[in-house]
Amino acid sequence: MTLLAGVLAASTNNSTLNDVEPGLLGFLVVAGIGIVLVFLLRSMNKQFRKLPPPEDPDDLGTDERGPGQGDVDASADGATPEGRRAEGAKRG
């Protein structure tokens, strides 16, 4: 067992197969990805500038609000709580 470990240790130190470096090709690939990324980010920013700014919900009037965006205590039929109390008094 000791002899096998010694042979393996000696062979790995002398081997040139373990000396792997990325070299010029690796550098060019990484540099190319970086350049493409810069152009993609510039294009994305250009597309975002074309989008209209979001509307502020506080600036919308009551007529422009969609369903579910009105007053909290208003019912689906638009009656106020006072109107519902008056209708209940008439019925009962």
Image: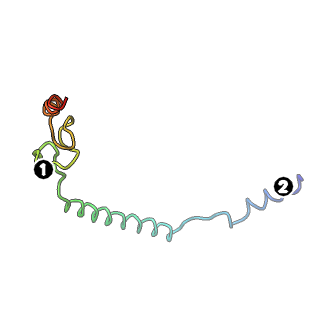
Q: Position of residue 48 (x, y in %)?
A: 24, 60
Would you place residue 49 above or below residue 24 in this image? above
Secondary element at tag 2:
helix
* Residue sitting at x 13%, y 33%: 83
Horizontal relation, residue 40 to residue 85: left or right: right
Would you place residue 85 above or below residue 69 in this image? above
Horizontal relation, residue 79 to residue 2: left or right: left
Characterize the local packing of mark 2: few (<14), some (14-19) or many (20 or more) Cα atoms within 10 angstroms: few
Q: Mark 1 or mark 2, which has the lower sequence index?
A: 2
Q: Position of residue 4 (x, y in %)?
A: 86, 57
Q: CA distance from mark 1 to mark 2?
A: 83 Å
Q: Which residue is mark 2?
A: 6
Q: Which residue is mark 1?
A: 64
Horizontal relation, residue 26 to residue 66: left or right: right
* Residue sitting at x 21%, y 48%: 67
The kind of residue tagged 2 is Gly
Q: Residue furthest front?
A: 92
